[in-house]
Image (tube, grey):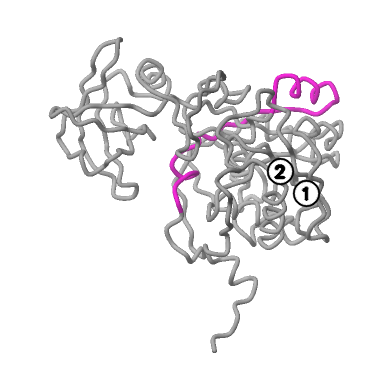
Amino acid sequence: MKPEKNKVELDFQLNSYNYILDPALIANEPKEIRHKSRMMVVRNSLSQDNCDTNKLTENIIDELSSGDLIVVNDTKVMKARLQVMKENGYKVELLVLENKEDSIWLCLAKPAKKIKIKDIITLNSLKGNIKLKVVGIDNETGGRYIQFPDKCNSLQSMDKLLEDYGEMPLPPYIKKTDQSMSHESRYQTKFAKYPGAVAAPTAGLHLSNDILQELKKRGVKVLPITLHVGYGTFKPISKDNLTNLKLHKEFVKVDENVIDEIKIVKKKGNRVIAVGTTSVRALESCYCPISKRIIPIEKDVDLVIKPGFQFKVVDGLLTNFHLPKSSLLLLVSAMIGRERLLKLYKKAIEEKFRFFSYGDAMYVSPEAFLETSKFRP
């Protein structure tokens, strides 16, 4: 008879992050008013089920104090989904991921097997037709390297082309409806500024301009960082053993003024609250283990946050309810524990919370963090 695995071993097994969700709970469209989504507030770390399920995201105001700092991700989702046609008339879909060099971009293709090196494919639009060339294959992602027009050599120039030819890259679990609200405006945060993401930092979708202004009135500071949500965030984890998990790199920029403000906030005994797991990854990537301090960064990062991680910057988190077996579940489990998180998800399912990108929110309060997840210098 095989011995039962202990909790630590299970923390590093992908199957331990699975749960069963009724597809009817997957949100296909957003709330008409952003801050009217439901919000589960997770409290005391000593209690497995200590949470409040009767809040709305507008109540985040009541959870914060003057002097606290909220950090949001100001990445802008590009209309990165392209419909192209091969010379034989066969249609293929591309998802533009990232720039490799000059005007060559890594794209996921669907179906990928139909796209071969040296193929010429065409973008069709009322704006005119554009010829593209397949110049390589990426072994890690299975994607294709596509030669775009010479002018498409930066995120800004590619964003201009995508505005004319692309579609918003909604997740596949969002089924298109006849809703009057445009995905192009709703699948974008109110603070989106810098193009580069292929998926929204969805926790930020809950924050309306009214809530942002009210937070500032109450003395809560709101500052942006940038993490361009890319392949690493939504790529399925392929190995069951999570011990040596690696994630695809994503570009992060955290300015010096944000670092300075974090230091002031911490010194005064206030809290740093991240809006979304992308903000968590960006902020925690600022910690330099050599100098043992946080520093501004502008680089690609591949930080993996899973149980056992100690948080050096973030004290609280506003997030969504995430897909089973995802790296995002690992991140939240690192804060409050895997078993507790799954119990909270079970409760959310029982109480009919809405899940995934357009779904409801979870606020992990500072007191909900495991003591072992808090960094002690």
Relative to residue 220, is residue 341 drawn left or right? left
Quadrant position of residue 343: bottom right
Q: What segment carries the magenta color?
A: 207-236
Residue type at tag 1 = Val
Per the rendering, the mark at residue 362 is 2
In the rendered image, the quadrant that contains the C terminus is bottom right
The answer to whether the residue labelled 1 contacts the one labelled 2, judged by CB atoms less than 8 Å apart, is: yes
> Magenta stretch: residue 319 in it?
no
Residue 252 place in picture, x, y as percent: 53, 36
The reply to whether the magenta stretch includes residue 228 is yes
Q: Secondary structure at mark 1?
A: strand
Q: Which residue is mark 1?
A: 42
28 on left or right of 66: left
Quick one: label 2, few (<14), some, or many (20+) residues within 10 Å?
many
Measured as percent of width and height from the top left, residue 83 is found at 30, 27
252 to the left or right of 65: left
Residue drawn at x 54%, y 32% is: 200
Q: Quadrant of the N terminus?
A: bottom right
> In the current view of this chain or complex, which residue is farthest to the bottom?
1
Q: State which quadrant residue 130 falls in.
A: top left
- Categorize mark 1 by other alpha carbons within 10 Å: few (<14), some (14-19), many (20+): many
Q: Residue at x 72, y 28 (%)?
A: 35
